[in-house]
Amino acid sequence: MPELPEVEVISNFLLDKIKNKQISSVAVNNWYLRVPITGDIDDMLKGKVISDIKRRGKYIIWHTDNNTAIIIHLGMSGKLIYAEYNQVQNKHDHVVFLFSDNTSIVFNDPRRFGLIIVLNKEQEVNFFDALGAEPLTDEFNGAYLQTLLKNRKVNIKSALMDNKLIVGIGNVYASESLFRARISPLKPAQDLTYKECEKLATEIKNTLSDAITAGGSTLKDYAQPSGSAGYFQNSFYVYGKAQKPCKICNNIITHIRQNGRSTYFCNVCQN
């Protein structure tokens, strides 16, 4: 599943390519994704101009000139594909946004866990109301993180992946951030000291920012809208490195399961 860096890369790409463009049509080939696509999406969006594109957590938000928000989530395997023409449709191309200059954005999703809905301003606010803190903001620091983790008895890795606390840090970047901060993923979240929270907040920002600069991580399905792969996976310290030597101390990387998800860490560096 694309995590915060991948969604940020996609949002920035689209901001450059389709901001100020007018939507000429929206063709829906499959209405049933995670939830049904907004039924009159073509009528609602035809003629509207993309005024801005933002990211909230793992959601991509297209704002139009009439305060309408197009909310997109890529699910497990979704892609947004940019083409400088009205692209010939392929299998799993569920939605095609065509613009007045004949460029297009295609939503392709083999597993259909993605989402495309259209909301007004009030609905948009309510939709995102339950989401947690954005980790790349100035407000996200050691003190803020320690407040979030107070009384959280779950392990710190599970806490980092709780979107009601912090958004966008999925399995990959939780493992990598904890390694960089030298904190065990097994440690109860509430037991982190202020110094550990300060270090972890810093390394979360560093890890996510480094991944964005690298175009994200391509492990299975992820690709940028241009079709290019990300390459941050080449910089992983622990994720997917089970039974390989740690880059720092040469200890063998451990692989365990936490809440049904793979966790990778170094028993020595993260003791």
Image (tube, rainbow, N blue to C red):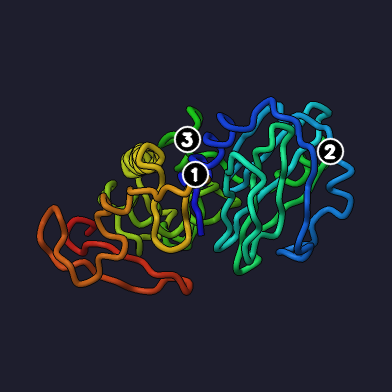
Q: Residues within 10 Å of mark 1 (few under 14, many from 20)?
A: few
Q: Are marks 1 and 3 in contact (CB under 8 Å)?
A: no
Tell me the SS state at disc 2. Answer: loop
Mark 1 vs 2: CB contact within 8 A: no
Please give the count of numbered marks on the rendered protein. Answer: 3
From the top left corner, tell me how far across and down residue 229 is, in percent: 40, 50
Tell me the tag on residue 136. Answer: 3
In the image as oriented, which residue stretches furthest toward the left? Answer: 250
Residue 29: image x %, image y %?
A: 76, 61
Residue 156: percent from left, percent from top = 41, 57
Tell me the mark number nearer the camera, choosing from 1 and 3. Answer: 1
Viewer-side label of 2, 3: 2
**Label 2 sits on what residue type?**
Lys
Secondary element at tag 3? loop
Q: Is residue 50 left or right of residue 271?
A: right
Alpha carbon separation for disc pair 2 and 3 = 34 Å
Q: Tag 2 or tag 1, which sits nearer the N-term?
A: 2
Residue 26 shows which numbered tag? none
Residue 186 found in image quarter: bottom left
List the residue tagged with mark 1: 226
Q: Quadrant of residue 105?
A: top right
